Amino acid sequence: MASIITLADEARYAFDNLLEGVLGGPSTLRLGVTGLSRAGKTVFITALVHNLIHGGRLPLFDAYASGRLAGAKLQPQPDDAVPRFDYESHVRNLVDARIWPRSTRRISELRVTLEYESASTWKRTFGPGRLDLDIVDYPGEWLLDLALLNKSYGEWSAEAVAMSREPHRQELAAEWHHRLQGVDPDAPADELKAQELAGTFTSYLRAARADEYALSMLPPGRFLMPGDLEGSPALTFSPLDLSPDREPVQDSLAAMMARRYESYRTHVVKPFFRNHFARLDRQIVLVDMLAALNAGPAALRDLEQALADVLACFRPGRASWLTSILSRRIDKILFAATKADHVHRSDHDNLGALLARLTDKAAKRAEFAGAEVRVMPMAAVRATREVTVTRGGRKLPAIAGVPLEGEEVAGEVYDGASEIALFPGDLPKDPESIFEAARQFQSKPRDLAEEAHDDTLALRYLRFRPPRVERSETGLKLSLPHIRLDQALQFLVGDRLQ
């Protein structure tokens, strides 16, 4: 990302950081929460805040377990122009209605103030400590857009068209390909033609994101989450079948597309980087490994590339008082394989190993720059419990929960009310075996690749409803159950509560 950051940008970041330090004090930590579609960002933030405020089960969060965390409460957020994360509504959905909150569709923010007693005797003489934890939630698709800042329109077009012709994408992009065939890039600019191409291109991106395919490489991200920009020229463009270095003819369709692509980069992508992403101190990236495994080797390979692009956008570095003022850097990055409750705990290490393999190269680059990187399987809200089932005289480790309405196994469709016990299968102990299958899939003709998908990597995991939250003897609802949320908190925040 160094090439997109000018000296003027760095000077502005330094000024903003200095001003924030003067106004907000050194006790502020900005935590970025991201992940690709349906990875569980909203659920993670809601569960984290709910457990902090209601005194959840957090035995491995040191400040809480040692009794030094005096309390946590919501405060007005510092950025008045950023929508507030709707914590209260999401809690009602999870606890009362037992439905999962809607996916993140825009940036939002929430401040939680943690009051604590320092572990240091010397620091305790100055009174209780206070940390303002600013949680910034944003769609992972927006993060993928940052890579566009290093690509010209011609480079992006050639890359997007080539990707759409890969075997697992070709059918999804058929309508857009049909429209492209009749387009002359040198023809005069035509607004109706631009709308037609942008519409079919967006339909292809939406189809690729569906659960059946679960593809991750889908920039531009705002095409899928347009918000207030829907219908604007900044979102009315499309790749064209061009060579990367071709200069558009003046006033042509290609020139119109290139100009709108530049507007998208200038007015949509770069402000997000400057105003939000460049100000983060810590980052958690949530990854739905099980959805990729469900969808097969193409989705897994796509996810690997998407995570590499995501990591390339980070500004990692070792934290110090000077760097926090002059140039904010992300000094801790946590990659969490979400929905760990959908497999038995005996498979958690295998799930973590898969994610570690997926992020290995990029994580090493971040560590080289001075950041601390960790990978863990996690469930911010635990929707299942562990049981043992007997099959063919064998006792198998299984999970029990209430599948979402419409989930299906072996022709049986569930009603969203009945609990079942399920043996989810075993993840391979060697993650390389799955990636080898993905490489073989890529090298095979389309029909053989689809057969390999059915026979090799067709692992199937159900989606479950949120659990019933237990009540205390007085009837008070307790905190949301989780898996390793306390470990995530300790890694991301624990050192700031010493």
Image: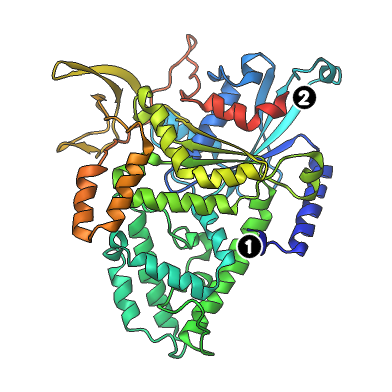
Give x and y (percent) for residue 480.
47, 24
* Observer-nearest of 272 and 95: 272
Between 51 and 276, the one lying in front of the other is 276
Quadrant of the image containing the C terminus: top right
Give the quadrant of residue 167: bottom left
Q: What secondary structure is marked by label 2? A: strand
Q: Residue tagged by mark 1?
A: 270
Asked if residue 472 lies left or right of residue 425, the reply is: right
Q: Residues within 10 Å of mark 1 (few under 14, many from 20)?
A: some
In the rendered structure, which amino acid carries the disc numbered 1?
Lys
Would you call the spot at circle 2 few (<14 residues within 10 Å), some (14-19), or many (20 or more)? some
Residue carrying label 2:
129
**Relative to residue 213, is residue 476 drawn left or right?**
right
At a point 14% along the width and 15% down the height, the residue shown is 393
Residue found 42% across the figure and 28% down from its top: 349
Q: Residue at x 34, y 29 (%)?
A: 343
Residue at 53% over, 18% down: 57
